[in-house]
Amino acid sequence: MDTATATVHGRCAPGFEPVREAFEENFRSRGELGAAFTAVRHGAVVVDLWGGWSGPDRTRPWQPDTLANVWSTTKGMTALCAHRLADAGELDVDAPVAKYWPEFAAAGKSGIPVRWLLSHRSGVPGIGLDRPVRVEELYDWDLMTSLYAAQEPLAEPGAAGGYHALAYGWLVGEVVQRVAGQGIREFFAEQVAGPLDADFSIGLASPADLDRCATLVDPVVTEEMANALATAFAAAGPVALAALMNPRVQGHDANDPAWRQAVMPALNGHGTARAIATIYAAIADGTLLSPTALARARESQGKEIDAVLGLPNEWGLGFYLGSDARGFGPNPTAFGHDGLGGSTGAADPENGIAFGYTLNQLGPLIRDDPRKMALVQALYTCLEGRHA
């Protein structure tokens, strides 16, 4: 795709032009279809770009208000809800989950603290394979939370983390609901999105928003990658299969209106890049969390190899830390969350920066998609230039 076909709109503050160049290069050489990227520094928008097409038929240009399903980038928003409650003194992250959600105590889970849900250490990263789950069942909140309440641990709680790919949303989301007395979609709207005028929701609350949604396109997978994935899944144990394959969700599933309107707080946040950057900027500058709460949110839970994904991780409480991979720039304590296929949201309080990225041509990676990394690297090159 050439940049004449994929017109790029928006602006960059003086000194941030390299970010636009990286954004355009994503269309030229990295397979971008439609996307948006926003960066906020010290409260001011310094990058706000969008371009390409909202669907593979290339009939609708991507607009400033195009919504994208951002997959696990949603998890950061879900964690934020829990931290808002903890900051208000209504939720103790070291208390047992069962204090707030008594049914969760079943099957030997009475001692699991909220902290282990937030850091993917509950030992319940999915529903056991003896109870197959269909994609359509994910839309039923009461069913899913009841399944997780009854599920016995599949791995040792509190041991090395195992990515709660789907589970995270119902586990943390039900705690939020029990404490707040309202669903997490409503809580997030009232506590976060509404006050910031941020165009992000955990599942679409209004059917009218369906027309603004980008159509997601499944990753382009080479034969070599397909063979590697097949080998990996063949060798995967029951814990990984429960976490990732019960059910197996695919990119195009997110185009179903029923998916878009369900409440799945690990999977189906819909928003703009501008909204994601706005929210992370408000986390970093103290608008949404006190200094104590922010420190708690990005307190390292230790470096490890994830038991589900086999990747090196360093979790805070609900957020990836930049760590050795520097996925959110050079600051190892920058924090955020990527989504399947490439989206991201992150903040770096020490450098006063926050950013969000949305797209519709999914890549094959869980995190650190090459397009995202090109944008982040360009952004920090600009910051270094301003300090020079």
Image (cartoon, rainbow, N blue to C red):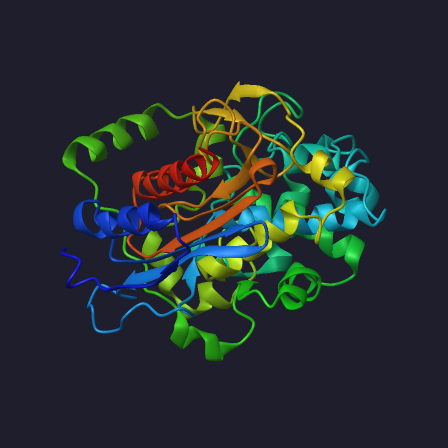
Total numbered badges shown on the rendered structure: 0
For the C terminus, the image quarter is top left
Question: Which residue corresponds to the image point at 70% horizontal and 40% vertical from the top-left?
Answer: 294
Q: Is residue 360 left or right of residue 159?
A: left
For the N terminus, the image quarter is bottom left
- Given residues 125 and 270, the one toward you in this image is 270
In the current view of this chain or complex, which residue is farthest to the front?
Answer: 388
Asked where in the image residue 223 lies, by quadrant, the reply is: top left
Does residue 144 appear in the picture of this structure? no
Where in the figure is residue 331, as x and y percent of width and height? 52, 29
Question: Which residue corresponds to the image point at 20% horizontal and 62% vertical from the top-left?
Answer: 6
In the current view of this chain or complex, which residue is farthest to the right?
Answer: 89
Where in the figure is residue 220, as x and y percent of width and height? 21, 46
Q: Is residue 113 left or right of residue 188?
A: right
In the current view of this chain or complex, which residue is farthest to the bottom?
Answer: 208
Placement of 110 over or under 341, stated as above or below: above
Placement of 377 over or under 70, stated as above or below: above
Where in the figure is residue 242, as x and y percent of width and height? 48, 36
Q: Is residue 260 left or right of residue 190?
A: left
Where in the figure is residue 71, as x and y percent of width and height? 45, 51
Does residue 31 appear in the picture of this structure? yes
